[in-house]
Amino acid sequence: MPSAFVGGDAIAAATATGITTSGESLLVVDLGTNGELILISGQGVVATSAATGPAFEGYSISCGVRAVPGAVSKITWNARKNEFDYEIIPGNPEKRAIGLCGSAIIDAVAECRKINLIQPNGRITPDVSGLIEEDSGRAIAFKGMAKDGSEVDLKLTQKDVRQIQLAKAALRVGIDALLETTGLDAIQKTIFTGAFGAGLNWENACSIGMVPKPILQGKIETIHNAAGVGAVNALLNRTYRDQARNFAKTVRCIKLESLPEFSSIFAQASELNAS
């Protein structure tokens, strides 16, 4: 395997996407508690691991849940009505929102940033409407009715925003490191794997600096479980397995923590601004 943190699942995901045979510059991002990134270009194959933590999957977030029926999957600010609009994953018979899944959490931060409920440094703005003052600090209230008629009564706390900042900064530093190593200023195609990537609004992700603009300038595709697809293919096809093994030998890994001035780079990446 290329390294301790870029292993078989990352190689399986990359081979399932066709990244090993395409002539394009391609980035595969396998998002989970540990984000694994592989970039192939004319400069070779480079990979890294980003400790994104569980925030993108709804864990460590006060109202966070997995992408299951009843979870809010999309949040947008409706300026005309001066309120938020919500979309919910169907299938919950109780007709109420049970929490925010990863895509909605990114939407919440991005939309609140646009209307200055959240400042660039991640601090929830004081003395504005829509806030809840709790013993633990400020929180932003998300209340109303979803498009399907489900009741929404949830919140995003200051601690939640900080968790998202840490997760998105880790991912951003990883992507930037691969781009700098290869000298690329654009990526022709980016493939995100996992349910989180499939439902995410990438314009919002870019607006808070989670992904750089070169990502949006190319094509974006999603595969729900590329690692699983690649693993099954390898089990059933010896030629495919040999190709994956040979591909793994070409991967050069970058350790993010060994980057010069890593701490300052990470701190800058935690800012909630497009860049």
Image: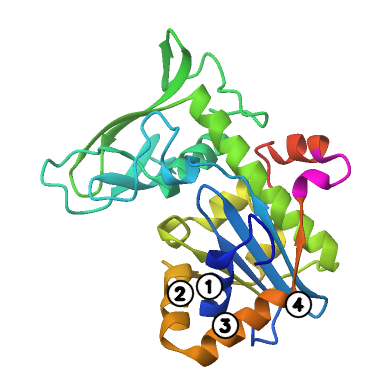
Q: Earlier in the sequence, mark 3 or mark 2?
A: 3
Count of labels shown?
Answer: 4
Label 4, secondary structure: give it: strand
The residue that appears at 51% across and 78% down in the rendered structure is 16
Asked if the residues shown at circle 1 and circle 2 are in contact, with their CB atoms under 8 angstroms apart, the answer is yes
Q: CA distance from mark 4 to mark 2?
A: 24 Å
Q: Is residue 218 left or right of residue 140?
A: right
The answer to whether residue 19 is visible is no
Give left or right: position of 240 versus 274: left
* Rendered location of residue 9, percent (x, y): 53, 65
Q: Tell me the residue that label 4 is attached to.
A: 41
Q: Which mark is residue 18?
A: 3
Question: Residue furthest toward the bottom?
Answer: 239
Give the Cα distance between marks 4 and 3: 13 Å
Looking at marks 4 and 2 on the same chain, the residue that comes earlier in the sequence is marked by 4
Q: Which residues are magenta?
A: 256-262
Which label sits on residue 231? 2
